[in-house]
Image (cartoon, rainbow, N blue to C red):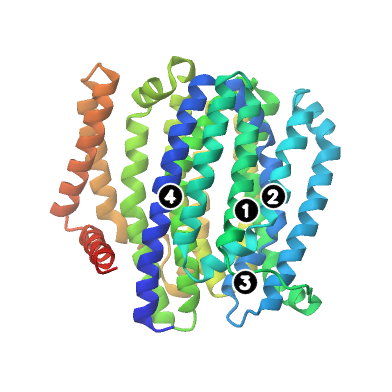
Amino acid sequence: MSQILLKEKAIKGVFWNTIEKISVQGIQFIIGIILARILMPSDYGLIGMLAIFIAISQWFLDSGFSTALIQKKNRSEIDFSTVFFFNIVVSILLYLILYFCSPLIADFYNQPKLVDLTKVLSLNIIISSFSIIQTTKFTINLDFKSITISNFIAVIISGSVGVTMAYVGFGVWALVWQSIIRASILAIILWVISKWKPGLVFSMESFKNLFKFGSKLLAAGMIATILRNIYSIIIGKYFAVQELGFFTRAKGFTDLTSLTVTSVLSKVSFPMLAEMQDDKKMLVSTYKRLIRMTSFVIFPLMALLAVIAEPFIRVLLTEKWIGVVPLLQLLCLARVLTPISTLNMNILNVIGRSDLFLKLDVIKVPIILGALLIAIPFGVKAVVIGHVISSVISYLLNTYYPSKFYQYGAINQIKDIRMILLATLIMTIVVGIVGSSIDHDIIRLLVSIALAGIVYFLASYLLRIEELRVVKSLIMKLKNDNNSD
């Protein structure tokens, strides 16, 4: 694929992936607010207790094969069919394991309701297995428009059902069925609009070749998933279910912001960079631009969310959720580095070094567990502070190989984004001072958000931050492309 064509597809990929995240996450955000106002923190706590089991199963279901298919240059239809049938078989096995282990999970948390919740919620694993290959093929082709449309329809329908169920008194089951209905509708739509159908073939040779690359990602992903969700296990085990509900909502808000940016970048940048893996100069140049652009977007968003956390929670979720505020502010600090860390790790997959990806994740285990064990006796807030510290250390570790291979480690990255950090700091100080002088929560929210945008872009202009010009050019490019279409 030529550089010009690749760039055009990447721009459209970014556009549609961003549209997906803004529309889908926006609708999901509104639905989440409505559900949170109806339901209790304990309902979210119960779902949070199951998060790690579902997350591990979902990761094991894919086993790194999607990434292996994207990274592989000479992929064939046999490869796709082989992975498809593997996914189906594994999903059934995983569901059966969770089904029969549901009493053990309930006993661990001392929550009898988890028996039935586990059996039903785990159906998502089987349902999701039917849409993995379709999503992978769309991703390879940078066709995020199809994914966007599918997700949008699924979220609208499932969200409507969830809100209705919550309103008539189904409680935590509203969250469960919302999740199942979304996965089902998404799978159906992707099958309908996708031209691909599996062939009746399973190649052991294809399986071995893909698993050679994917197995290391599977191990790394399992470790990362466990460490990412272990906070829910600890909080659910040692603290009140309401505390886990507060943590789950705080994590949901920060993930909505940080992981949305991460998801957009990962889905678009990985197949794009994979096409450049044989052109080191072009690869490194694009990689550096991605780091800067990511920082330009994520830093002010997370800083603003931390500053407006109190009026934000009080207005949207009501006073019963005020316990979310300190956890949300701390998690904003932890999540601000997540997208950059992801890019630093993804570059290893691009060049086929999933072994180093795994090695880095293994090194992080004692650091994260150590911080967690030290913090437990001091309460939930201390646990989250430990998470912030381990996130910073993880970022530094993730920059080791980029420094070694491309001379672009933490020091050079920080140098590149120092003006963005300064613009973010200026915005945070101004918004914090002005916001603290306003007593009315809604007015404070509106003023803070508007002021943040004005101050940040003005600071970026005065500091001559290149990414501001890039954003303007990208908007004009997309506008012209849409007009020409």
Element class at badge 2: helix
In this view, the mark in front (3 or 2): 2
Element class at badge 4: helix
| Residue wearing tag 1 | 187
Front residue of 73 and 379: 73
In this view, the mark in front (1 or 4): 1
Q: Mark 1 is on which residue type?
A: Ala
The image's mark for residue 255 is none
The image's mark for residue 127 is 2
Q: CA distance from mark 1 to mark 4?
A: 18 Å
Q: CA distance from mark 4 to mark 3?
A: 24 Å
Name which residue lies at 77% across and 30% down: 116
Name which residue lies at 40% across and 59% down: 16
Name which residue lies at 38% across and 53% down: 19
Q: Mark 4 is on which residue type?
A: Lys
- Residue 315 location in percent, x, y? 36, 21
Q: Mark 2 is on which residue type?
A: Ile
Front residue of 447 and 413: 447
Tell me if label 2 and label 1 are in contact, CB under 8 Å: yes
Tell me if label 1 and label 3 are in contact, CB under 8 Å: no
Q: Is residue 301 visible?
A: yes
Q: Earlier in the sequence, mark 2 or mark 4?
A: 4
Q: CA distance from mark 2 to mark 1?
A: 7 Å
